[in-house]
Image (cartoon, rainbow, N blue to C red):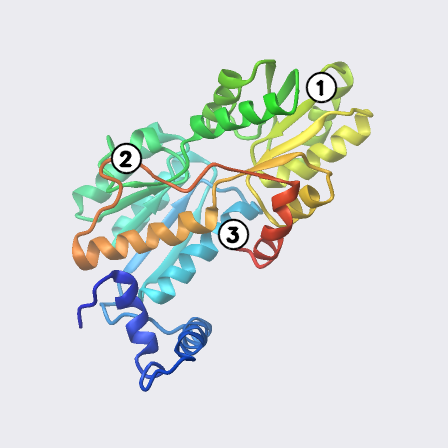
Amino acid sequence: MARFPTWVGMALAGALSLSLAGCSSTGGKRAEDARKAAAAQGRAAVNTPRWTFAMITHSGDGDTFWDIVQNGAKQAAVKDNINFLYSHDDEAQQQAQLVDAAVDKKVDGIIVTLAKPDAMKAAVARAEKAGIPVITVNSGSAESKAFGALTHVGQDETVAGEAVGEELNKRGKKKALCVLHEQGNVGHEQRCAGVAKTFSGKVDNLYVNGTNMPDVQSAVGAKLQADKSVDAVVTLGAPYADTAVKAKQDAGSKAEIDTFDLNAKVAAELKDGTLGFAVDQQPYLQGYQAVDLLWLYKYNADVLGGGKPVLTGPQIVTKGQAGALEQYAQRGTR
């Protein structure tokens, strides 16, 4: 492979080499057009071997957040000439078995979430013993290095929770309900603990069954009916924000609904004022960077982070910012 000053130059070279010949003042546009064409036609921008990377997450069915993560990972996989495999299970033991299955397939790299790290430790160790590089993503930043992963890509969940507490203070809120939709998820616990750490008011945690939206709506509505002093509800995932809005309406509550994560529905509801604010951890970037960092490691033994997580968030998104992000949310990249 020809060498270029940066990996970006290297990635672009394969896709743009023909279009850049005889470049003029329109070269920038030509380069952009060629980039779009290469992506649309599924062409790799590098000539490294067609390695296989597997991503195994703790996602349940129908969670739009993970669709965005996959969109990023797939885009990077096209560019990097990667055969990308995705699997998921919200039961930790089953997720660990999926990691074992990827090891048995002798994949060239593994991307994994550590929502329930104790259950995943042995599977990650087996991957590393087999010589398969591992990157953790989204959850498990505290355990990633100890488990031997190259790096972690995501947000610090405690810091994200603290940002929410500070935003609630700015809005003059006095009592918040933090809705945890997956019991045992360490990241969710860290988020709510972070909120409680910086919020000047009181925080009540409410555990719900996130796989059953009617139950979520009923539980949140019952809490709001029973406690009229709750003036903010914080959901920990975008799909649950709209459910909380419906629960609020059922209960006749005036509480503000805020949420972690962004999707097209959340962006629209931020824009029209239905939601107060959202915490964006840029899931597209998590998927894209994880694949790209594995490719860089395989190609050039590069490792980012210096032993620290590569942070993709948090970013507080309010009504004034939602309009600018809505188009990206609609196409599935924010």
User: In this picture, is 245 found above or below 104?
Assistant: above
Front position in the image: 154 or 42: 154
Which image quadrant is residue 327 in?
bottom right
CB-based contact (under 8 Å), mark 1 and mark 2: no
Question: In this figure, which residue is indicated by the disc labeled 2?
Answer: 308
**Disc 3 or 2, which lies upstream in sequence?**
3
Alpha carbon separation for disc pair 1 and 2:
39 Å
Which image quadrant is residue 313 in?
top left
CB-based contact (under 8 Å), mark 3 and mark 2: no
Mark 3, other Cα within 10 Å: few <14 / some 14–19 / many ≥20 = some
Front disc: 3 or 2: 2
Labelled disc at residue 67: 3
Front position in the image: 202 or 105: 202
Residue visible at 34% across and 75% down in the picture = 15
Q: Furthest-front residue in view? A: 25
User: In this picture, is 204 found above or below 23?
Assistant: above
Residue visible at 24% across and 30% down in the picture = 146
Evaluate whether residue 69 shows in this view: yes
Question: In this figure, which residue is indicated by the disc labeled 1?
Answer: 223
Q: Quadrant of the N terminus?
A: bottom left
Front position in the image: 103 or 76: 76
**Disc 1 or 2, which lies upstream in sequence?**
1
SS class of the residue under badge 3?
helix
Residue type at mark 1? Lys
Residue type at mark 2? Lys
**Disc 1 or 3, which lies upstream in sequence?**
3
- Residue 293 placement (x, y as % from top left): 29, 52
